[in-house]
């Protein structure tokens, strides 16, 4: 998938001009962009702390290192393995069951998806101006529609499961009794119970609203990061176009790809900017630098905190995968 997207992103562009665009960029703008990115990471940390409160009250600063480790794992392993990694580290440090913490992480991802779709739908008039002869961008409205069905459907299911835990557990028990082999039923039932306990933060409308508003703040900060990196280049698009770009990129990175979202990040960004009138090589240079600015700092910080844990990375991932099905 990544090779296809990379080919799509760079076809017809002159690589020497992309390089020239990169080496003439004003790299000083990366300093405030990295700062604002880590402000967003701090807000993410607070959001996860908020979701974890019913399980255990953990100071946000204690969670920060685990969040960075998770994003490091997402950046160097496929299939967002970093989510399993941070669930495992949380179990080691705070003794919270992996299945319970995974429930909170899935809730995070659902709210992120809802906000990303809101960014896209808010800017549909802008998108409509770009769909003519814009290839990939022309199919975004359809993708966003199906994505909205998926994310809002998932959010509804999770909200109902949180508000009616006893009914949900009875339905889950019936399914387990009829579809799961006998030898696995006790384990699956135990994991289901712990998973549902991870949804407790969604039982309060106030808490749901708080998580939603926090998610909006997170992605506005990330869009501000897009804007700051743009200042390093001699082109300008408005903030709403960058919101649209942010939404499209993050929806596309949910597709299977190589570690670090290679290709699935770059192709939609280049396509949208080109459709907005930015020269292709300039759009490519900006998107590649933006990708690096989002990837490298958090990966280095996460690696630093992980090395301080003194845990073998492969062992940690294997243990996290096992933890989804055992009594951890």
Image (cartoon, rainbow, N blue to C red):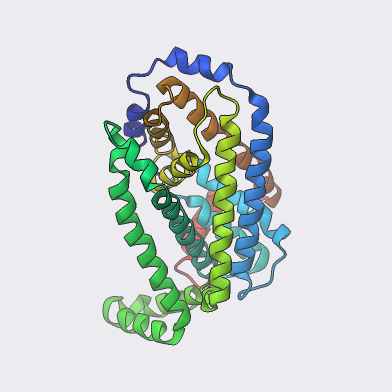
Q: Can residue 252 be seen from the camera position used here?
A: yes
In the rendered image, the vertical position of residue 21 relative to residue 7, given as above or below: above
x, y percentage for residue 33?
64, 37
Going by the image, does 227 lie left or right of 57? left
Going by the image, does 32 lie left or right of 80? right
If the image is split into quadrants, where does the C terminus sit?
Answer: bottom right
Q: Nearer the viewer, residue 20 or 191?
A: 20
In the rendered image, the vertical position of residue 298 relative to residue 113, given as above or below: above
In the rendered image, the vertical position of residue 240 relative to residue 48, given as above or below: above
Quarter of image, res 154: bottom left
x, y percentage for residue 7?
33, 27
If the image is split into quadrants, where does the N terminus sit?
Answer: top left
Q: Residue at x 40, y 27 (%)?
A: 277
x, y percentage for residue 309?
68, 52
Q: Residue at x 44, y 38 (%)?
A: 265
Q: Which of 95 and 59 is in front in this view?
A: 59
Q: Can residue 72 be seen from the camera position used here?
A: no
Q: Which residue is drawn at 32% across and 84% down?
A: 174
x, y percentage for residue 12?
33, 19
Q: Which of 17 and 323 is in front in this view?
A: 17
The number of callouts visible is: 0
């Amino acid at each position: 998938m990544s090779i296809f997207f990379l080919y799509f992103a760079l076809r017809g562009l002159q690589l020497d001009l992309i390089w020239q665009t990169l080496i003439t960029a004003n790299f000083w703008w990366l300093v405030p962009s990295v700062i604002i990115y880590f402000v967003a990471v701090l807000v993410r940390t607070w959001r996860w702390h908020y979701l974890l409160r019913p399980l255990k009250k953990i100071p946000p600063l204690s969670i920060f290192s685990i969040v960075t480790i998770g994003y490091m794992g997402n950046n160097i392993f496929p299939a967002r393995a970093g989510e399993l990694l941070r669930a495992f580290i949380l179990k080691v440090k705070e003794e919270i069951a992996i299945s319970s913490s995974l429930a909170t992480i899935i809730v995070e991802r659902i709210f992120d998806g809802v906000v990303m779709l809101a960014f896209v739908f808010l800017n549909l008039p802008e998108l409509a101006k770009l769909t003519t002869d814009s290839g990939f961008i022309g199919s975004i409205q359809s993708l966003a529609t199906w994505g909205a069905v998926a994310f809002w459907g998932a959010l509804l299911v999770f909200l109902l499961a949180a508000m009616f835990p006893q009914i949900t557990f009875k339905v889950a028990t019936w399914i387990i009794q009829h579809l799961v082999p006998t030898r696995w039923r006790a384990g699956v039932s135990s994991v289901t119970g712990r998973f549902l306990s991870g949804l407790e933060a969604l039982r309060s409308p106030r808490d749901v609203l708080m998580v939603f508003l926090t998610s909006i703040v997170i992605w506005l900060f990330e869009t501000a990061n897009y804007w700051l990196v743009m200042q390093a280049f001699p082109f300008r698009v408005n903030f709403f176009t960058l919101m649209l770009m942010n939404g499209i990129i993050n929806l596309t990175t949910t597709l299977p790809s190589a570690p670090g979202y290679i290709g699935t990040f770059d192709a939609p960004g280049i396509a949208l900017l080109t459709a907005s009138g930015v020269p292709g090589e300039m759009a490519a240079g900006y998107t590649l630098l933006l990708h690096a600015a989002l990837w490298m700092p958090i990966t280095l910080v996460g690696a630093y905190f992980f090395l301080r844990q003194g845990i073998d990375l492969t062992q940690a991932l294997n243990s996290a995968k096992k933890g989804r099905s055992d009594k951890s």
